[in-house]
Amino acid sequence: MNPFLAVVVGVLYAVGTYLVLQRLLTRVIIGLGLIAHGANLLLLLSGGDPGEPPLADAAGVVSGASDPLPQAMVLTAIVITFAVTAFLLALAYRDWHDTRSDEVEDDLEDRRIAALAAREGRR
Amino acid sequence: MPGPPPLPFAALPVFWLIGSQLVVAALVLAAGRRRPRSAVIVSAGALAAAFGWLAAQVGTITSGGVVVEHLTWVPHLGVSLDLRLDGLALIMGMVVTGAGALITLYSGAYFKWGPPTARFVGYLTAFAASMLGIVVSDNLYGLFVFWELTTITSYLLIGFEDEKGSARAAALQALLVTGVGGLAMLGGLVLLAQQAGTSSLAALLADPPGGTVTTVALLLVLAGAFTKSAQVPFHFWLPGAMAAPTPASAYLHSATMVKAGVFLLARISPAFHTIPFWTPLVVGIGLTTMILGAWRALRQHDLKLLLAYGTVSQLGLLTALFGMGTPAAVYAGVAMLLAHALFKAPLFLVVGAIDKQTHCRDIRLLDGLARRMPGALAVALAAGLSMAGVLPLFGFVAKEAAFEALLARSPWLLALVAASSALTVAYTARALWGAFGRKPVSAQADLVGAKAGGTPLFLLLPAALPAALGLAFGLLPGLAAPLLEATVGTAGAGALKLWPGLKPALGVSAATLLAGLLLFARRDAVERLQRAGHRRLLAKWAPTGEGIYRRALAGLNRSADRVTAVVQSGSLPVYLGIILLTVILLPGSALVLGTALPRVDFGGHWAQFLTGGVVAAAALAILRVRRRMAAVVLLGAVGYGMAGLFIVYGAPDLALTQLLIETLGIVIFALVLFRLPPYFREARWRLGRALRLGVSAAVGLFVTGAALAVGTASRPPPVSAYFNENALSAGGGRNVVNVILTDFRALDTLGEITVVATAAIGIAGLVTGAVRSRRKRQEP
């Protein structure tokens, strides 16, 4: 295990988290993208040390290759992340189009429930 | 446990005993609304048929046989429907089905064959099925499921008049109290099954486990039994349950469901009564409940409440008897249980008839019903004298057996039970006099009953039959004796005698009768004493179970409100922050505490460091930029760096995909950002910048640690060996990753495509919707 790459995973998660904890939807989307990269790298690292591409020779024998299963999973993850990112971008576009803002507002309904509960709790 | 070979369903009579009731209940609830008469006939018929089948088994059971059936349900968890019909189950089953059939008929008349009839009868039949399930279950988990089904049907019946707030509150109270006890019992049953290595009740009792864990398990099971059978301090739900329509009170809350707890005690007590804590605890609780219930019954003015506290008292006596666990005590207990069902159900049914005729249950107001309702009087007398334990009724015979069993144990126990018997005589007299006697005319009392009509046949007959049976069993105890002997399994454990001879027990009986009548004769003085005692002592000093229940419920609601007020802020960053903090605290602390220091190895290809460094640097730079487009370009740099890492790691497919997707992603980002302002506007921060930085840094540290731990942890041989070996031969491809995606794990890929398609549909909706709304805005 290469500790340097583990730190890279940590950096990707940390920056991604920082961005996700904000209110601008575009920043949140970029943050999610970074976290997804971090997750992919984590999956890849869990497969062990680097090796040759997992390709079989004519006899069907694979030798000296890296673990193919995490690679398959990462491939799936990349595509899904892309789909989700595209959807969120469409959401940001629509939000901007309708409200001229790409900020994630507080959920007013949630706040009303909380205020109600606070009143009940004090009683 | 390998059971006998599976039988066809048709050959499982005990299974169908329960199943048929469930089918009938579903049928009646679904289709009975417009046909109340048919609903009553079908339900009562099914219960009567079940009673008939059980009666046909009497010969088999009394000669020592049992009927056993196994139906595997969840084999891995040892959950199966093991049904076992033995002596105790038979007698309880006959009470459930017999009383059920009669009370179903009664319900038809009680609801005047109106629309509520079918719903009521449907619940009643569903309850009968659940109760039969408790009675014949030989599997601990099956027992629990049926146990809770009776709790639920009881809830539906107590809250039957759901437009009344008080009925709903009483139903909820009963549900919560018995439900909490049931959950405790489930914990106890799981522990017991673990300790014994079997979930079969019969096997558990044949070879009972011991030790501390068993003690804890038994205490939990007792909590379930005590709540169900309304023992102190949980007794308060039973008087509350009198909010149910009277037929349900007669059936569930006197004859059957409240007996489930003592029934379970009767089952397990013989195996566990030698454990030191068992007898003092169970007998102690039982006797306390017995005295307290009888004392409070003496204070009631509502006939139903009077009877309900009487039931609490009788259940206490049953708990004490079964808690002793000796054959003689269990024998006497089963006799008492049968006697109680035979006298208490008719009394409730008579009260229901009085209530129907006069719309009143207050003993201070009912007047002159003896002449108006002579049939009801006769039934009430037969049942009431049995309750008071008067010769020659079955209540007397059973009480004598109980006295004998107690006397063998300790004269002190007998003294307590005798005192409670005297109270029983007094409250019985009070109930009979209160319902049928003449009242002195007083100014404020508005007496009712003078104009009451007679008792309709269907309100009288279902009450008369069990009362008559109480008389028959009293006169000829030999009728009931063989069944009772089958419940203890040993002949000669006890004996039922109409005339016990001039023995101490008979003297005690006579004394209690006299004392009880004296208490009744001086009822005004007794009432004053009770009221003063209650005001001076109990109301001030004793924490009642009901008070604790109320405070606990209110406290729970209040703390839920407070938590909601704090947690439900409506802010997305706060929600995410809480989730992330949980991740850091729970798995994070496990990581810190539970993992050995990772083996650090600074070797590696220079390209790893270079590309990794580019990725990290680009990611960090995103924090600094204010231009949206610059942030997107940096995100692209991270993506391309990832592609470089994929190449280093021998994953060309990934690198290729990443390059394509990243490019496409940047294009889409650009399309959207083209519309947005070029700079990020600094928003007002709810979560402080320092806090956000802290949480992010902690998440980063946690993930780094997790990555190192993953690399260090010992792993089972990867499944990839299989993929590598079979990629060409089974999958027909040399690129193993491709073969995994399209062949070995093709379902994953199908899921992935589904996500993409769903996202595409969503995007299309969002974008075309925006275009349409823009056009609309431009039109006017």
Image (tube, coloured by chain):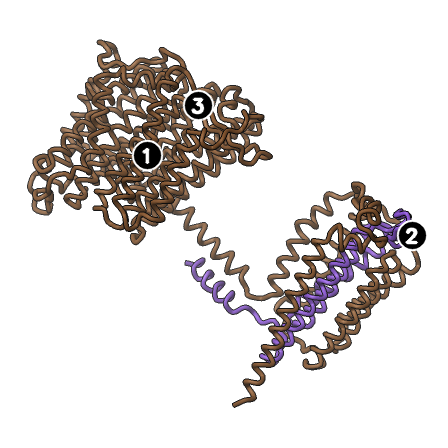
Chain colours: A purple, B brown
Q: Nearer the viewer, residue B613 or B164?
A: B164
| Residue B189, horizontal then vertical, whole percent | 51, 32
Specify whether A61 is left or right of B585: right
* Mark 1–mark 3 distance (CA, rounded to whole Å): 19 Å
Please tell me if label 1 and label 2 are on a single chain.
Answer: yes
In this picture, residue B419 sits left or right of residue B283: left
Considering the numbered disc 3 on the image, is that residue within a helix, a strand or a loop?
strand
Q: Mark 2 or mark 1, which is nearer the start of the sequence?
A: 1
Numbered mark located on residue B47 in the image: 1
User: What amino acid is labelled 1 in the image?
Assistant: Leu
The chain carrying label 3 is B
* Residue wearing tag 3: B67
Residue B77 visible? yes
Foreground label between 1 and 2: 1
Quadrant for residue B646, please give it. bottom right
Q: Residue drawn 64% across and 54% down?
A: B582
Residue B504 versus residue B738 in the image, above or below: above
